[in-house]
């Protein structure tokens, strides 16, 4: 029978993934002392992007399954954890999240169970689930940015949403002569840097 076509390398995607990985790890380091659950979320995104560097820059066939799974984990577990980190500063949610560090393990287990279940769903439902949980996280971050008067957080959250919705991560489509996936990585990485420039971290 015919063998499946090998996935080519995409050096420019590896570079943009490396940029986003660096931004994610920097954000994780910056947030570790003040927003620990958010730091873990940033770290998970950094791991997903690092696997993307290995996939698109070195060996697509070896690293593709790891990259795809880690990217889904980052979207369905990592991004919500970032949102929860910022949610602790929203007055309406403080009563529920006042012991956030203590309940962080429970939150991670619950999000991970949701992630595990999502892998069994159809691709359409998977994408809808990712959109809902990451969208809720960004709404929470926007709310916190607005209430605290942090323009950096607002800019970061708006950039994240625009990167996800307006640009998207289509590897085979270009916008302004640049692969959409590369723009997506550069915009989201920059959005993380903006969030870490705020007075909340």
Image: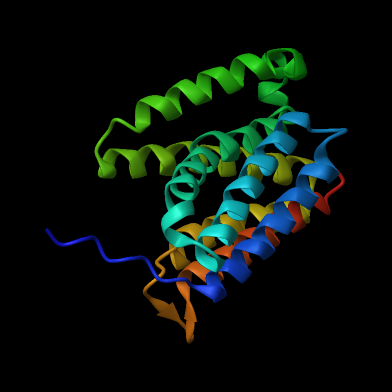
Classify the position of the N terminus by image quarter.
bottom left
Classify the position of the C terminus by image quarter.
top right
Q: Is residue 46 visible?
A: yes
Q: Is residue 124 left or right of residue 150?
A: left
Q: Is residue 1 left or right of residue 4?
A: left
Q: In front here: 39 or 86? A: 39
Q: In front here: 108 or 9? A: 9
Question: In the picture shown, does residue 77 fall above or below 146?
Answer: above
> In percent of the image, x 68 and y 14: which residue is there?
103
Q: Is residue 98 visible?
A: no
Residue 199 location (% of width, % of height) = 87, 46
Residue 6 location (% of width, % of height) = 33, 65
Q: In front here: 177 or 4? A: 4
> In percent of the image, x 61 and y 14: which residue is there?
106
How many numbered marks, from 0 up? 0
Residue 114 location (% of width, % of height) = 43, 25
> In percent of the image, x 74 and y 40: which residue is there?
147
Q: Quadrant of residue 96?
A: top right
Residue that extends furthest to the bottom in the rendered view of this protein: 177
Residue that extends furthest to the left in the rendered view of this protein: 1
Q: In front here: 106 or 6? A: 6
Residue 145 location (% of width, % of height) = 72, 45
Question: In the picture shown, does residue 20 fall above or below 196?
Answer: below
């Amino acid at each position: 029978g015919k063998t499946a076509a090998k996935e080519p390398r995409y050096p420019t995607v590896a570079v943009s993934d490396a940029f986003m990985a660096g931004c994610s790890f920097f954000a994780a380091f910056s947030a570790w002392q003040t927003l620990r659950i958010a730091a873990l979320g940033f770290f998970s995104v950094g791991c997903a992007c690092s696997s993307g560097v290995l996939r698109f820059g070195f060996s697509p066939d070896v690293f593709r399954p790891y990259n795809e799974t880690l990217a889904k984990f980052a979207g369905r577990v990592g991004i919500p954890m970032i949102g929860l980190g910022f949610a602790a500063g929203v007055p309406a949610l403080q009563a529920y999240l006042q012991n956030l560090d203590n309940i962080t393990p429970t939150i991670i287990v619950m999000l991970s169970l949701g992630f595990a279940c999502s892998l069994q769903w159809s691709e359409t439902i998977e994408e809808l689930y990712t959109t809902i949980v990451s969208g809720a996280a960004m709404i929470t971050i926007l709310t916190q940015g607005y209430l605290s008067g942090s323009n950096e957080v607002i800019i970061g959250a708006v950039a994240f949403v625009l990167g996800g919705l307006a640009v998207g991560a289509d590897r085979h489509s270009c916008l302004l002569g640049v692969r959409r996936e590369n723009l997506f990585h550069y915009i989201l990485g920059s959005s993380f840097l903006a969030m870490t420039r705020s007075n909340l971290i």
